[in-house]
Amino acid sequence: MKSYGEELPRERVVQKLLISLPKSYDSICSVIEHSKDLDTLEIQEVVASLKSFELRLDRHTENSTEKGFTSLNIESKSSKSGSSSGNHKSQKNWKSNGKNWSNKSNSNPKPNASNEGTKTPCKHCEKLHYGKCWYEGKPKCRGCGKFGHILRDCHGNQSIHKVNYANQIEETGTLFYACNVVTDVKLNNSWYVDSGCSNHMTGDGKLLVDIRRDVNSKVKMGIGETVQVAGKGTLVIDTKAGRKHIQEVMLVPRLEENLLSVGQMMEHGNCLIFGKGMVTIFDDWSLQNPIAEVQMTSNRCFPLTMEPATQLVLKASVTHSLQTWHKRLGHLNDQSIRLLANQGMVHGLPSLEKDFEVCEGCKLGKQHRDSFPTESTWRAQFPLELVHTDICGPMQTASMSENRYFLLFIDDYTRMAWVYFLINKSNAFECFKKFKAMTELQSGDKVKSLRSDRGGEFMSNEFHEYCSEAGTQRQLTIAYSPQQNGVAERKNRTVIEMAKSMLHEKGLPYEFWAEAVNTAVYLLNRCPSKSLKEVTPFEAYTGRKPGIAHLKVFGALCHMLIPSALRHKLEENSHKCIFVGYGLCEKGYRQWRTQELPLMGSQK
């Protein structure tokens, strides 16, 4: 090429030298390309390596007719006799550091007719002929397999086979290689098992989940272009052994194929067995759980078709802690919380994770004996057609307002509940009159029946006379048979358990039992009930779907803003408080600051 006036740099000479060698030198070429920097490699180093390898070939191969390294001097023949140029031979000297390297091989004598039976197979072109092969010394194209040109100059370079190289340059400066022969058929779910690839790689970010963008690595493509790695993610696939997560998959922009690194799979405990035209991938070295079997294609590739679990991964939204909402909803059971989310029974409840563990507060506050069997033979058909009531107390510790009892009213049709706190049980009659007046005005219905036990607070003459004048029927249980008022008894137990769970969870003193009970009733009215279908008691009673986006964890620390009229300019803007519930007579939160100050409210 120098005779035509072209100057070749050292690295170009090295590249052409390696490309021109025959098939038997592929292994040493691969070693040189993968372990040396071709930009700084000296020609004499390449020659020394090739000579050592040729000596090894000579020792292990008898009657070898191919000397790949001695073909550095390329001979070319002109056209046959009759052409204007005539026959001639041209020689090319390769110079490096003052040394000349020339062809030392000798031509075989011209065969004659008597040598017809002495044809030998040529290791260069793999054909039978006499003497020296005409193609000897000519480069062989790695694309089409023909002699006389290289891959870059091949007219069939746009055929279905091409070579894709990727070199990964890590921050440590170590050079890795990813080499794979691929086809023009681009399939997003096809991954090529590659022993030369240092990392799992893909150019399609849609295949990955949990992509980390804080990756400072680069990949050097086969065309010499260096590409910044866009991130690392996880590939979720469905296999014979179940769903698998392939970690640390590089997202390389403009990479046309998906590559699976054999080395990386082995580092993660996988076992790969190559043989009989296929590779079998096992989950571990016990060889008991095969993940996939990949057949080798005609171009010696191993394309593995994997179905990504995209329908589950790509549609997944940000999940929130089920434990947090379990506490926000007063330690409501997980089935009811999922029912709220799945049926859209409330506003403001996000997508929740699946895992749930019983919290310590529930273990301390909800353990009880199994309920007695109950058979409901009749249910109310309208709101306030039947109201259940019962008193719970006395509590060993008085509340912040000196109350020791609480009184529940439960509507049988909607399961809506109301709570009143009492200092003495004798105040039950006054609470009933308030309840009756409020609910009848709100709903437009009348309280038709009142079911209670035979406690003294319900058996007074004034109670009977009031119900008789109002037309409210009294339903009293038989003595020592609280199961007949099971709705009120079970509601009392549920409220007490929820209140105790919230108190024990945050370690609050028992003086807050009334705040916890009030919060429990507020939350239960906005939670599912077994007696209702896909609606909450609040919606069944009011006809409106409740919102719960404003809910907070009972006993959580919070800061209450001090009105500007109650502080001067240098005082703090808020007080550190404890959240203890929701206001009933005002729209706001109930917060407790210190034992010396009363409970205060703040805006929701």
Image: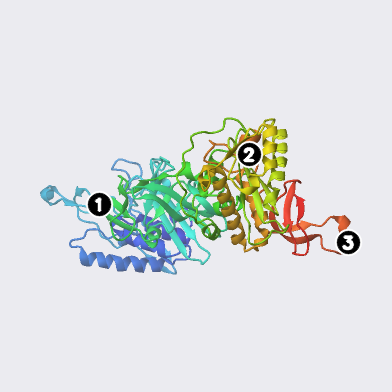
| Residue in the foreground of this view, choosing between 592 and 172 | 592
User: Alpha carbon of mark 3 to alpha carbon of mark 2: how far?
Assistant: 44 Å
* Mark 3, residue position: 569
In terms of sequence position, does the residue under pointer 3 or pointer 1 come before the other?
1
Can you give x and y, in whole percent of width and height, for residue 61 in the image?
20, 63
Q: Is residue 303 visible?
A: yes
| Residue in the foreground of this view, choosing between 495 and 95 | 495
Q: Amino acid at mark 2?
A: Phe
User: Alpha carbon of mark 3 to alpha carbon of mark 1: how far?
Assistant: 101 Å
Residue positioned 38% across, 58% down in the render: 265
* Mark 1, residue position: 133
Task: Please identify the quarter of the rendering in which residue 91 is found.
Answer: bottom left
Q: Amino acid at mark 3?
A: Lys
Disc 2 element: helix
Question: Which residue occupies the extreme front position in the image?
Answer: 461
Callout 1: few (<14), some (14-19), or many (20+) C-alpha neighbours within 10 Å?
A: many
Residue positioned 61% across, 55% down in the render: 499
Q: Amino acid at mark 1?
A: Cys
Q: Is residue 205 visible?
A: no
Disc 3 element: loop
* Mark 2, residue position: 538
